[in-house]
Image: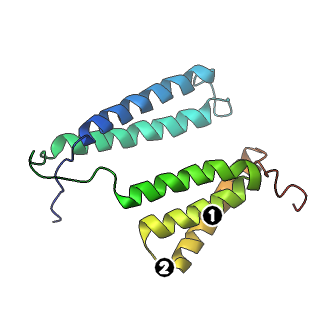
Amino acid sequence: MKERSPLRPGELVFAILLAAFSALALWQAYRISGFTGLSTPGIFPMLASATMLIASAFILADALSRRRIESGAQTPVLTPRLVVFVAMVAAYVFAMPWVGFMLSSAVFLFAGFTVLWRRSLLVSLALTAGTLAVIWIVFRLVFQVVLPRGTLLQGFL
């Protein structure tokens, strides 16, 4: 059995804040239209925030069950991977209005899978394509949401 890592400084506080934010998001999503039917405007935000709340409950339970790290031990809070990923999220948000949702999401997902998961480029590419296909089917075909195209590529698409 794999040994569990000790609780890092701030991890329990973060888990509590994550659970509180998820509960607040679920409440706000419920206030959109209640749970009156599967085609109401608030159903997707409610499903997303309920998923967040369930996941945060597991994270909080895990954090509560682990022992704290000794006070003398130093653990990095801002790891290089975290800094790179935060920069990638910022670039994704910045690029979306110009190059559109699908292209910026494709680049972001591919880079994220490659940097964080560290599998082969072919696996990252296949996972990116599959994820984008699911996003396209769910949002464009099922919910009929027009995904933003972006101003830079407007004439080309």
Q: Earlier in the sequence, mark 1 or mark 2?
A: 1
* Quarter where residue 9 is shown: top left
Residue 5 location, x and y as percent? 18, 56
Front-most of 60 and 77?
Answer: 77
Q: Residue furthest right?
A: 155
Front-most of 84 and 8?
Answer: 84
Residue drawn at x 17%, y 57% as measured from the top left: 4
- Quarter of the picture holding the N terminus: bottom left
The mark found on residue 107 in the picture is 1
48 versus 157 height, above or below: above
Q: Nearer the viewer, mark 1 or mark 2?
A: 1
Q: Residues within 10 Å of mark 2 (few under 14, many from 20)?
A: few
Residue drawn at x 31%, y 38% as measured from the top left: 15
What secondary structure is marked by label 1?
helix
131 versus 45 height, above or below: below
* Quarter where residue 152 is shown: bottom right
Residue 140 location, x and y as percent? 75, 50
Residue 57 location, x and y as percent? 33, 38
Amino acid type assigned to the residue bearing label 1 in the image: Val
Residue drawn at x 51%, y 62% as measured from the top left: 112
The mark found on residue 76 in the picture is none
The mark found on residue 120 in the picture is 2
Amino acid type assigned to the residue bearing label 2 in the image: Ser
152 versus 25 height, above or below: below
